[in-house]
Image: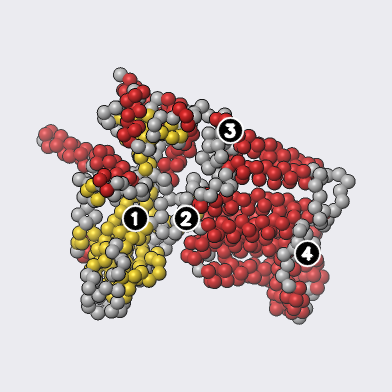
């Protein structure tokens, strides 16, 4: 009995050791004949719990978007539009600073094709995608669709066993996974995850609505409008009812505007548009125009004839008159609210879907609230500050902020195009100039066209000016390489700079002149190799252990480890002094020379790119395919940590213990 138990334990241990090759998505496919030459290809994936897979529409600079690659397309068939997706979730990624789009629980993709060559029998398709939880995996799945020759309604379901790369019967798969959608249409069965992007838009729009109330076009309208309801209504209850109708009308007007924008452009089109260079350039120009308007150069106004016509309708009274009063307020106040509305609509485009509607709901709710509250509690009107020059100060302050924010979007476009026109130093110089001018404005040293004469500034304005001046001074060392952690998300990264090492190398102890052959400066100025052979040769020269860092350009949890764990003062000295770091990027799409390409003995797949090579190395030697993955080895490639040979996304404490254990063994 003991022998049987021992054998079972050994078997379980072996199974556990080899169960690290993860494949969290199970696919089924089908092909539907629409006409003699038109066919619909469908991919349905079931995603394991706690994992998510990125969409085709995840923007550049973020996690790895899905690619649908059709083989041998030229002369055989053409694609009808872009592949369509089922239900996805959008959320803000604070590491890559983009609104990423991904599938949860289920992934549905459809692509219609039109045959050109009637003799073609099969269509070969590959899906390249990234799936993540606490680690990330880059996968490629290959599918073969057999062209059906029967009637339009016949569906030929297929699934590919990617290890053998051959078509297998899908009926057995459906028995195991009955929850996979079997309809001819895309059915998204995934539950909607909390959409942080929509909540962010709503809260930002709510704040914008309250801020818009303080502008010169809106603030004086509050007591005037409330007085109309309280004095013109026959009873107090009627006045309160009319104010509620008025508030609801304001909300309705702006929601209709958001709905029109969504309907005109479409949810997916807005999202796709927002991820590109064009969006960032347009947003930059709009913010500059809005900023110049707020600074007092001109006013953005709707035609006066619109306001006159609406005023005539408002005079009719009743519910219709109240609705037109709300519309008149929206038109008259547009010179102040227009920039807010424009910013919200364009910002919500990055979220996609109903983002513009949610944005307008947040803005209009805050905008309408005072008109309702003061009608219910008219005595509160006495506590409102008097209208005056302070309102224009608020407007100008917002103009400076919009101008500064505009350059963030111009910087995004410059980064994507890699034109190096707005590098870190240039960006910071512009921000220092803008916020410096704002500080002088708040101190009363600069006046603008619509400012009232002031004999002195208030204590509040003085304190705000001191805060802005302090922020301006804080940014100045950034011109010489200071990290500026408070605003690290806004300027271009340190490496996108005229002097990546800091002016005169003052920001670090490294220099490109003393870097070993094949090395470069990585995160936190750590010397890192991305070539295994060169890194190994250098490690033998200095007699230090090697840390293999299996990572990815689009690996969000790799960046989190680098930002939060590697930067810790308990970890950073170890990475700089005690090991040789070799970072191997599994999503490096550069092709290997033909002579170096090969067929993997583990997966039977052809290894064509540098990323494929390191993925195969990871799977073959360490029996896993997740990133980040860290391995400490000696100079012969043997793992130094015998109990825990590899470690992934973890805490500072566990990472420190793991590093020290491996390094101490190397020194023995």
Q: CA distance from mark 2 to mark 4?
A: 42 Å
Q: Earlier in the sequence, mark 4 or mark 3?
A: 4
Q: Which mark is residue 597?
A: none
Q: In the rendered structure, which disc, 2 or 1, sits on the residue that comes first in sequence?
A: 2
Q: Is residue 496 above or below residue 348?
A: above
Q: Are marks 2 and 4 in contact (CB under 8 Å)?
A: no
Q: Quadrant of the N terminus?
A: top left
Residue 479 in which image quadrant? top right
Q: Which mark is residue 128?
A: 1
Which one is nearer the viewer's eye here, 23 or 175?
Answer: 23
Look at discs 1 and 4 and give the one toward the viewer: 1
Q: Nearer the viewer, mark 2 or mark 3?
A: 3
Q: CA distance from mark 1 to mark 4?
A: 56 Å
Q: Which residue is mark 3?
A: 503
Question: What's the residue at 59%, 37% (across, down)?
Answer: 484
292 to 236, vertically: above or below: above
Q: Which residue is mark 2?
A: 59
Disc 4 crowd rating (10 Å Cα; few below 14, some 14-19, many 20+) is some
Q: Nearer the viewer, mark 4 or mark 3?
A: 3
Spatial separation of the CA atoms under disc 1 and disc 3 = 42 Å
Q: In terms of secondary structure, where does tag 1 sit?
A: strand
Residue 564: percent from left, percent from top: 48, 37
* CA distance for labels 4 and 3: 53 Å
- Which x, y percent locates residue 117? 27, 73
Q: What residue would you read off at disc 4?
A: 221
Mark 1 crowdedness (10 Å alpha carbons): few <14, some 14-19, many ≥20: some
| Image-based side of 420 in relation to 55, left or right | right
At a point 52% along the width and 64% down the height, the residue shown is 270
Question: Mark 2 and mark 3: span between their CA atoms?
Answer: 33 Å
């Amino acid at each position: 009995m003991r022998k049987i138990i021992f054998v079972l334990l050994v078997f379980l241990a072996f199974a556990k050791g080899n169960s690290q090759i993860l494949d969290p998505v199970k696919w089924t496919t089908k092909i539907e004949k629409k006409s003699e030459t038109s066919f619909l290809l469908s991919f349905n994936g079931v995603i394991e719990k706690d994992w998510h897979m990125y969409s085709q529409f995840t923007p550049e600079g973020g996690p790895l978007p899905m690619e649908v690659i059709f083989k041998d397309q030229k002369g055989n068939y053409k694609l009808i539009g872009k592949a369509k997706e089922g239900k996805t979730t959008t959320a803000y990624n604070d590491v890559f600073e983009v609104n990423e789009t991904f599938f949860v629980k289920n992934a549905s993709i459809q692509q219609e094709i039109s045959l050109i060559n009637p003799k073609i029998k099969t269509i070969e398709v590959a899906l390249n995608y990234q799936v993540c939880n606490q680690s990330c995996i880059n996968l490629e799945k290959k599918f073969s669709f057999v062209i059906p020759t029967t009637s339009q309604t016949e569906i030929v379901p297929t699934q590919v066993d990617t290890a053998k790369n051959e078509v297998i019967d899908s009926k057995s798969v459906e028995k195991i996974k009955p929850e996979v959608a079997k309809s001819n249409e895309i059915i998204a069965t995934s539950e909607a995850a909390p959409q942080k992007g929509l909540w962010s838009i709503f809260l930002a729009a709510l704040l914008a609505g309250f801020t818009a109330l303080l502008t010169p076009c809106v603030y004086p309208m509050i007591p005037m409008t409330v007085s109309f309801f309280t004095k013109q209504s026959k009873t107090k209850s009627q006045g309160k009812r009319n104010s509620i109708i008025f508030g609801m009308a304001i909300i309705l007007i702006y929601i209709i505007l958001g709905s029109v924008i969504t309907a005109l452009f479409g949810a997916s089109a807005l999202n796709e548009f927002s991820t590109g260079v064009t969006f960032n350039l347009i947003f930059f120009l709009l913010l500059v125009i809005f900023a110049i308007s707020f600074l007092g150069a001109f006013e953005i106004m709707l035609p006066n004839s619109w306001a006159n016509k609406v005023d005539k309708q408002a005079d009719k009274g009743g519910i219709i008159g109240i609705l037109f009063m709300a519309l008149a307020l929206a038109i008259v106040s547009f010179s102040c609210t227009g920039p807010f509305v424009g910013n919200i609509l364009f910002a919500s485009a990055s979220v996609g879907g109903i983002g513009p509607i949610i944005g307008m709901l947040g803005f209009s709710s805050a905008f309408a609230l005072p008109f309702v509250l003061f009608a219910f509690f008219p005595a509160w009107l006495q506590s409102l500050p008097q209208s005056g020059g302070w309102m224009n100060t608020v407007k100008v302050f917002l103009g400076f902020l919009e101008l500064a924010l505009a350059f963030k979007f111009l910087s995004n476009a410059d980064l994507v195009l890699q034109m190096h026109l707005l590098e870190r130093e240039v960006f910071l110089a512009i921000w220092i100039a803008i916020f410096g001018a704002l500080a002088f404005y708040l101190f009363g040293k600069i006046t603008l066209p619509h400012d009232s004469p002031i004999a002195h500034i208030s204590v509040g304005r003085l304190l705000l000016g001191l805060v802005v001046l302090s922020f301006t001074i804080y940014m100045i060392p950034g011109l010489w390489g200071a990290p500026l952690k408070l605003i690290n998300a806004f300027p271009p990264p340190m490496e996108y700079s005229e002097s990546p090492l800091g002016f005169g190398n003052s920001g670090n102890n490294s220099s490109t002149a003393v870097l070993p052959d094949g090395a470069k400066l990585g995160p936190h100025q750590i010397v890192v190799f991305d070539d295994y052979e060169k890194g190994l040769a250098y490690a033998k020269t200095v007699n230090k252990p090697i840390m293999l860092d299996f990572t990815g350009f689009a690996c969000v949890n790799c960046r989190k480890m680098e930002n939060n764990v590697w930067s810790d003062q308990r970890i950073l000295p170890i990475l700089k002094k005690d090991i040789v770091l070799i970072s191997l990027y599994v999503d490096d799409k550069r092709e290997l020379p033909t002579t170096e390409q090969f067929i993997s003995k583990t997966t039977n797949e052809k290894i064509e790119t540098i990323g494929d090579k390191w993925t195969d190395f990871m799977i073959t030697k360490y029996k896993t395919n997740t990133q980040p993955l860290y391995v400490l080895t000696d100079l012969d490639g043997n793992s130094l940590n015998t109990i825990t040979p590899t470690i992934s996304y973890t805490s500072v404490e566990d990472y420190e213990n793991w590093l020290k254990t491996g390094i101490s063994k190397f020194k023995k």
